[in-house]
Image: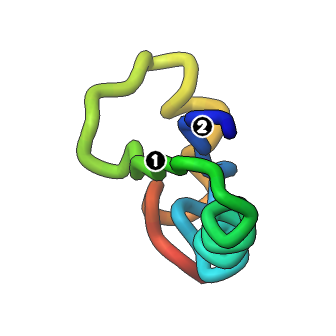
Amino acid sequence: MAEVLLYHHVQGLTDGVRAFADELRQAGHTVHTRTCSRTARSPAWRRACGSCGTPGSTP
């Protein structure tokens, strides 16, 4: 089976992303999920996502 690093979308590590990770795990894969909410981001990323709310949060 595969070892997967699953990155989330701009809305963060949502229930849907976690559920997808669980499906992959149930299929026998090793899945790692990480949130980017507390890591440094480039100024361009912050400008692009500035109106999206708090990075890493769930709406």
Query: Are the residues tagged 2 and 1 within 8 Å (C-beta)?
Result: yes
The amino acid marked with disc number 1 is His
- The residue located at (60%, 37%) in the rendering is 4
x, y percentage for residue 35? 40, 51
SS label for mark 2:
strand
Name the residue beneath numbered marker 2.
4
Q: Residue at (63%, 50%) from the top-left corner?
A: 29
Q: Which mark is residue 32?
A: 1
Which of 50 and 42 lies nearest the eye of the viewer? 42
Instruction: Name the residue at 67% across, 66% down.
Output: 17
Q: Is label 1 in a helix, a strand or a loop?
A: strand
Q: Alpha-carbon neighbours of circle 2 within 10 Å: few (<14), some, or many (≥20)?
A: some
Q: Is residue 56 left or right of residue 50?
A: left
Colour treatment of the image: rainbow
Screen quadrant of the C terminus: bottom right
Counting residues from the N terminus, which is met first, the one under dot 2 or under dot 1? 2
Residue sitting nearer the eye, 29 or 44: 29
The amino acid type found where label 2 is placed reads Val
The answer to whether residue 44 is above or below residue 21 is above
Q: CA distance from mark 2 to mark 1?
A: 6 Å
Compared to 59, does 34 lie above or below? above
Q: Position of residue 36 (x, y in %)?
A: 39, 43
Which quarter of the image is occupied by the N terminus? top right
Of residues 46 and 55, the one nearer the viewer is 55
Q: How many marks?
A: 2
6 versus 23 height, above or below:
above
